Amino acid sequence: MHIGLCYDLRDDYIAAGYSELETAEFDRLDTIDALADALQRLGHRVERIGNVRALTRKLVAGARYDLVFNIAEGMRGYGREAQVPAILDAYELPYTFSDPLSCALTLHKAMAKRVIRDSGLPTPDFAVVTQVGDLDGVQLDYPLFAKPVAEGTGKGVDGRSRINDPAELREVCQTLLARHRQPVLVERYLPGREFTAAIVGSGEEARCIGIMEIVLRSSDDADAYGYLNKEECETRVEYRLLEEPLLERVIEEVALGSWRALLCADAGRVDLRCDANGRPNFIEINPLAGLHPEHSDLPIICNLKGIEYDHLIECIVESACRRYGIGGERPAVVDAAV
């Protein structure tokens, strides 16, 4: 197939004057190289498109693709991850991963949690603070946890995110509102273990292919899997494959239920944390999970499970092809997991 590759290259934005933090969710060149190389090894002809503006220029000029492999995050607004899928829908071109509705819904963590809660799945009680005056209406028991309502890659999350009293809540929310210029999600802090579940497939075909526990080594940010811990994960984080059958089944149930409730497609991750009773709760979902072969959580889980990077990419492409009715053989399954 002729596959177009959509992405936001971090170096391009930094060269244009954006900061490291502003571009934290964007991909580095080695990720794009790895993904393009994998697709080529699978027999596809790959065209590197770039970001949403580059895609628009190419489509207006008449370019067309059998499939677009989309990992573009976008820059502004709650709908930024939905921009590329929306344009591709308008041009009736097939693409990998979730559609505009799911991308926008899952980026806004509070909206996603409302869907999860209404679906009967466990998630911590929460409030949304859009201005400092909203703090008087937060009726949640401490400790709490605060983060920007629509950021990824741990932006706005650090050791101060765990909040013990109203004074801390006010200080943290004031800082986040000013720095990130968006509402703050405040939710009940969960003291238990933290996990991320890898999902491949769509709808009833979706399967959990592995669950990884995230263990933060001793640091100032030991309560939060935030931006700094993710950027320096090799020294700050220990990743452990979960091998506890009873807990695995409960996490799979919550993760797959969340994936289906939010209508996510092809592949991604569901983040969960246990409450004081050891019950896994939905925290957030990532329908555009990072795909760096060594640094990103989804490929790390696959590596721990013995699933090769090329096979993960093949399964993503095949899942998209099945959704669109594009012909082709289904890839061989590793350990019947994918």
Image: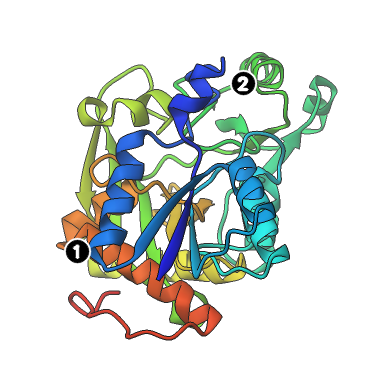
Q: Residue at x 61, y 21 (%)?
A: 165
Q: Residue furthest right?
A: 133
How many marks overall?
2
- Disc 1: CA contacts within 10 A as few (<14), some (14-19) or many (>=20): some
Using the image as rendered, state which of residue 293 and residue 52 is in the foreground: 52
Q: Is residue 222 left or right of residue 171?
A: left
Vertical comparison of 323 with 110: above or below: below
The answer to whether residue 161 of the structure is visible from this angle is no
> Looking at the rendered structure, which numbered label has been put on residue 23?
none
Above-or-below relation of 231 to 44: above
Decide which of tag 2 and tag 1 comes sooner along the chain.
Answer: 2
The residue carrying pointer 2 sits among few (fewer than 14), some (14 to 19) or many (20 or more) residues within 10 Å by Cα, namely: few
Q: What residue sits right under mark 1 in the picture?
A: 307
Residue located farthest toward the left when viewing the structure as drawn: 306
Which element type, helix, strand or loop, lies under badge 1?
Answer: loop
The quadrant of the image that shows the N terminus is bottom left
Q: CA distance from mark 2 to mark 1?
A: 45 Å
- What residue appears at the point 67 percent right and 49 percent down from the top-left corner? 83
Query: Circle 2 — which element?
Result: loop
Residue to which mark 2 is pinned: 165
Label 2 or label 1, whichever lies nearer to me, is: 1
Vertical placement of 142 versus 287: above or below? above
Q: Is residue 209 left or right of residue 115?
A: left
| Image quarter (top left, top right, bottom left or bottom right) of the C terminus | bottom left
